[in-house]
Image: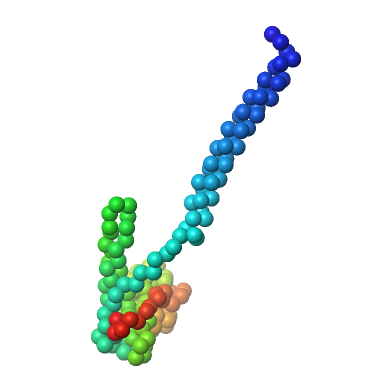
Amino acid sequence: MDTTRDPQRRQLFARVVKTIQAAIGGTLGVVLGGAIVSPSFGRREERWLPGPSLSGLAENAPTQIALRVVREDGYSQIIERRVVFLVKTGDAAVTALDPTCTHLGCRVSWDVEARELRCPCHGGVYDHLGQVKSGPPPAPLPRLSTKIDDDR
């Protein structure tokens, strides 16, 4: 056996293994980097869900409405129902509130007589605009973006 060629042979195999590892690392870097960075370059469609007419909303009192949200999931469409509170705060101003309590995620409801939003689980109380009045909730109800188009 020729011992002078053995170190060169080992160096060749080491280079081949390092080249394969570099190719695998580069491929993973491109795939994972693309998955992380690509959402920031994608165009986001602005979708607004239609609500009731402004004339049908009571002034300074939350009105519970159910919205139909259609989303794509692979090859199928999934239709979800989302409940929100709409509060008319002026002639052309509406505040949309997510009815999920910020304490533990229960759904709040509007108490007409007391004029407050109440959480049935742990006694959280919010005013008509979702600000915490009493109880354990750590933050006000989340507000959702609204847009008024004509009377809707």
Residue at the far left: name it: 56
Q: Is residue 93 above or below residue 38?
A: below
| Residue 151 in which image quadrant | bottom left
Who is closer to the viewer here, 101 or 79? 79
**Along the horizontal axis of the image, is 8 left or right of 145?**
right
Q: Quadrant of residue 1?
A: top right
* Residue located 54% across and 46% down the image: 30
Question: Can residue 72 be seen here?
Answer: yes
User: Who's the residue at 65% across and 29% down the image?
Assistant: 15
From this viewpoint, which residue is outermost toward the right? 4
Q: Position of residue 50 (x, y in %)?
A: 29, 75
Residue 133, x across and y down, in percent: 42, 83
Q: Percent x, y for residue 32?
A: 51, 48
> Left or right: 131 with respect to 82?
right
Query: Is 59 placed above or below 18 here?
Result: below
Q: Is residue 2 left or right of 92 when viewed as pictured? A: right
- From this viewpoint, which residue is outermost toward the top? 1
Q: Could you tell me which quadrant the C terminus lies in?
A: bottom left
Question: Which residue appears at 63% of the width and 32% of the height?
Answer: 18
Looking at the rendered structure, the number of numbered marks drawn on it comes to 0
Q: Residue at x 65, y 27 (%)?
A: 14
Q: Is residue 113 visible?
A: no
Residue 43 position, x and y percent, is 44, 63
Along the viewing direction, whichever of 48 and 95 lies nearer the viewer: 48
Name the residue nearer the viewer: 103 or 46.
Answer: 46
Q: Nearer the viewer, residue 143 or 22?
A: 22
Is the residue 32 above or below the residue 117 in the image? above
